[in-house]
Image (cartoon, rainbow, N blue to C red):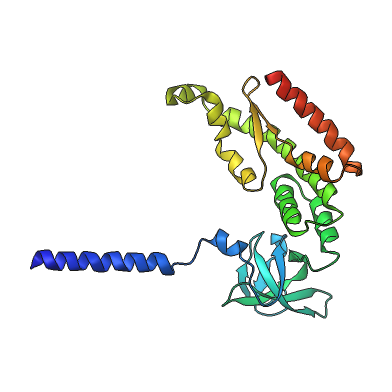
Amino acid sequence: MRSCLSKGNTLRILAAAILLVVISPPPLAAQERRIPGGGRAAVVVDERLSALRAAPNPAARLEQRLSRGRYVAIIATQRTSNGLTFYNVKVSRRRRGWIQAGAVVAPSHAADDDRLLQLLRGSEDFDLIARARIFLDTFPRSPLRPAVLLLYAREAEKAAAKLSREAGRRLNRDEMTAGGAPEFSYFLNFVGLDRYNRQGIRFNFDPTTRTFHYQGAAWREIVRHYPESGEALEARKHLALLKAANGQRK
């Protein structure tokens, strides 16, 4: 009898667990990539302004702070008496609110690619890279794309130098030797690379100098698709240096 009850309880627990898996919402990152329907698509680029509020007023009740890269759907626009523009946005099927227009860009807005480029030029480090990635994903046909690709690549190469120093400090040579894997594989698995990898940036590693270098995908895109642009000259120079460095390593 006890055995039957035990089996019955086990089956109920398993069923509940399966149901929980089925009805649990997807991770936040997956939700952020999903574009809500029912309006014009837009994406958050400036977290300093990304407060979702109950009314079109910077003093209104805060509902949620939207993270950079979060997709929303613009339903309506309202301009306040103090000159601010707010969008009424849909964040999910159940949540909507008001957000300051400067927090987001929309592919359907003709000047938003230029506005995001200006924000990029005032950004640095990882903020620049993350916003540049949003630009490249949101405005694939923008004439400003070569300029953004060059900013993205320059910052990636700067990041490579910083990551080289950081990895050199944090990866202990004796510990790597004790671990048994080749030393270069510890560097290529260095945790500091993860967030750059998620932004589409890959690095080569030179085991002789123990340094990272940007692989150059953005430079190649400039040369391939915008060979007559002003940015192509600098891109070719970087690719020539990259080729020479790869040749020396071989």
Image quarter (top left, top right, bottom left or bottom right) of the C terminus: top right
Looking at the rendered structure, the number of numbered marks drawn on it comes to 0
Query: In the picture shown, does residue 174 fall above or below 216?
Result: above
Picture quadrant where residue 80 is located: bottom right
Left/right of residue 57 with respect to residue 142 in the rendered view: left
As drawn, the residue found furthest toward the left would be 1
Question: Residue sitting at 17 percent across and 64 percent down?
Answer: 7
Query: In the picture shown, does residue 7 fall above or below 160?
Result: below
Q: 60 or 166, which lies in front?
A: 166
Left/right of residue 143 with respect to residue 129 in the rendered view: right
Query: Does residue 122 appear anywhere in the picture?
Result: no
The picture places residue 242, in percent across and down from the top left corner, at: 76, 28
The picture places residue 202, in percent across and down from the top left corner, at: 66, 39
The picture places residue 112, in percent across and down from the top left corner, at: 82, 63
Q: 173 or 80, which lies in front?
A: 173
Left/right of residue 228 with respect to residue 159 in the rendered view: right
Question: Residue sitting at 20 percent across and 67 percent down?
Answer: 9
Q: 125 or 72, which lies in front?
A: 72
Left/right of residue 225 with respect to residue 201 in the rendered view: right
Question: Residue sitting at 63 percent across and 61 percent down?
Answer: 67
As drawn, the residue found furthest toward the front would be 224
Query: In the picture shown, does residue 247 fall above or below 155?
Result: above
The picture places residue 166, in percent across and down from the top left corner, at: 62, 33
Query: In the picture shown, does residue 34 fall above or below 215?
Result: below
Query: Does residue 55 appear anywhere in the picture?
Result: yes
Image quarter (top left, top right, bottom left or bottom right) of the N terminus: bottom left
